[in-house]
């Protein structure tokens, strides 16, 4: 890849540092999309020994590119995102991918196709990790930053996706316990106060 193309791709990816997500960090500032993607890739790397049968390098690549469409659209919280929003984001991303040099274009298209189909163990693991990273981040944020609907969402978000592997199901159970303890320590759900 020539240096001009390299810098052009990085310029698009840089927008993920600027675009924020719905969740706060533990210090009370908005999390960037790039921070979410980075920690998601780290999660996959850390679990390599738990999934020796999977191509974890592929999972890490999926984690790194999964939200690149948000460089163009920004982040829309899951509870507001419509199918139309998701389709728009996918289409914009795919149009951008078509402009990439041949090797990267083929690699991104293959990964994105596999991710959207959610049929391979690698794609299923990436998707479950994506959901769990969001829940973990919300648990790390001050509960005062939660919307009332997030008290229940914290316990249901990703519940289907983690069924892809016993390890992920157990991880979700531990995160759920953490969530329940956090809610209890805060005096319960808003409607229970």
Image (cartoon, rainbow, N blue to C red):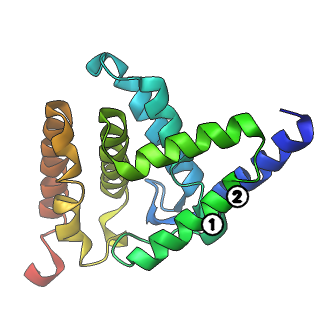
Distance, label 1 to label 2, CA atoms, is 6 Å
Residue carrying label 1: 92
Residue 10 is situated, as x and y percent measured from the top left of the image, at: 76, 46
Residue at (53% x, 40% y) in the render: 110
Residue 49 left/right relative to 184: right
Residue 32 is situated, as x and y percent measured from the top left of the image, at: 57, 57
**Residue nearest the observer in this picture, 37 or 117:** 117
**Vertical order, 8 against 143 (above or below):** above
Residue 8 left/right relative to 91: right
Residue at (70% x, 53% y) in the render: 98
**Vertical order, 141 against 37 (above or below):** below
Q: Quadrant of residue 44?
A: top left
Quadrant position of the C terminus in the picture: bottom left
Residue carrying label 2: 96
Residue 170 is situated, as x and y percent measured from the top left of the image, at: 13, 36
Residues at marks 1 and 2 touching, judged by CB atoms closer than 8 Å: yes
Residue at (27% x, 20% y) in the render: 50
Q: Quadrant of residue 151?
A: bottom left
């Amino acid at each position: 890849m020539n240096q001009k193309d390299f810098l052009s791709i990085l310029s698009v990816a840089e927008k993920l540092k600027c675009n924020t997500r719905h969740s706060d960090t533990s210090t009370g500032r908005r999390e960037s999309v790039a921070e979410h993607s980075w920690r998601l890739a780290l999660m996959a790397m850390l679990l390599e020994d738990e999934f020796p049968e999977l191509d974890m390098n592929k999972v890490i690549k999926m984690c790194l590119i999964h939200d690149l469409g948000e460089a163009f659209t920004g982040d829309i919280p899951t509870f507001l995102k419509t199918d139309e929003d998701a389709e728009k984001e996918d289409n914009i991303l795919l149009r951008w991918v078509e402009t990439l040099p041949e090797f990267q274009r083929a690699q991104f298209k293959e990964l994105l196709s596999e991710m959207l189909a959610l049929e391979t163990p690698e794609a299923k693991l990436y998707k479950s990790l994506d959901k769990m990273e969001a829940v973990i981040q919300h648990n790390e944020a001050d509960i005062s930053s939660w919307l009332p609907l997030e008290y229940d969402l914290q316990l249901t978000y990703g519940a289907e996706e983690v069924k892809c592997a016993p390890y992920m199901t157990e991880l979700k159970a531990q995160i759920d316990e953490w969530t329940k303890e956090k809610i209890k320590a805060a005096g319960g759900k808003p409607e229970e106060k």
